[in-house]
Image: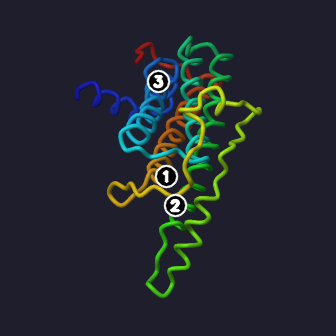
Amino acid sequence: MTVFNSLIKDFTQAPVPTLARWQEGRVLWAVMLFAAVFLLLSAMGYFQVFLGMAPCELCVYIRFSQCCIVIAGAIILINPRNHILKAIGVVLAVYAVAQGMDWSIKLMHIHDAAHLVVDESMDFFAEAGSAAGSACSTEPRFPLGLPLDKWLPFEFAPTGGCGEDDWSLLGMNMAHYCIIAYAVFAIGLTAAIVGWFSVFLGNKPSNNRI
């Protein structure tokens, strides 16, 4: 708690220099990497294996974006002070977060439509939503034409329909939690980029590293 309080104090007293210091250390990027690993393991271990929920087309796209975040973090962790490595990692991470957010929002809309029942006289809304969810393709098209569903079928081959899951926690489904996760990634990336750019503008980080 003392370390956490110290970090908060540093940030409130000098936010930009603190961000500049954080983005030159490894902790921030390691947290990003392991957060994405946690999401991947949760999707494959808990939902797919333990609960027996088959991934849909949008699910495997979301997994792809999380893999990109892992790769981006690994690239930056090689040397967080190397601007070339950081540029490659940041661009990949921004792309992954933007795409992941887009796919998660689409999945949320499909899920909400698939579970929409206004009343007994309007059950056709639910039927239409379920039809939309099951219309997901079983032949995904990954960026750059990567045949990930052929290389790693357990992770990337869609075998379920979009929006068909009934899992929820605190009134939110997987798509909602993915949106929250990507929002947190976006906030962290924005803060890191601000700190990184401030270095180019002459705002030198302190010698204390995390």
Q: What residue type is labelled 2?
A: His
> Tag 2, which secondary structure?
helix
In this picture, is 126 found above or below 11?
Answer: below
Q: Which residue is rendered at x = 34% and y = 54% of the image? A: 169
**Mark 3 vs 2, N-terminal side:** 3
Where in the figure is residue 80, as x and y percent of width and height? 55, 16
For marks 3 and 2, give the CA distance.
38 Å
Q: What residue type is labelled 1?
A: Ala
> Tag 3, which secondary structure?
helix
Asked which quadrant contains residue 12, the reply is: top left
Dot 2: within a 10 Å radius of its alpha carbon, few (fewer than 14), some, or many (20 or more) residues?
A: many
**Mark 1 vs 3, N-terminal side:** 3
Q: Which residue is rendered at x = 56% and y = 55% of the image? A: 162
Q: Which residue is rendered at x = 52% and y = 44% of the image? A: 55
Residues 21 and 76: in front is 76
Q: Would residue 142 be found to the left or right of residue 114 on screen?
A: right
For marks 2 and 1, give the CA distance.
8 Å
Instruction: Quickly name the residue at label 2.
Output: 111
> Tag 1, which secondary structure?
helix
Q: Which mark is residue 22?
A: 3
Residues 183 and 195: in front is 183
Give the quadrant of the N terminus: top left
Give the quadrant of the C terminus: top left
Dot 3: within a 10 Å radius of its alpha carbon, few (fewer than 14), some, or many (20 or more) residues?
A: many
Q: Would residue 76 be found to the left or right of residue 10 on screen?
A: right
Name the mark nearer the viewer: 3 or 2.
2
Q: Residue 175 carries which label?
A: 1
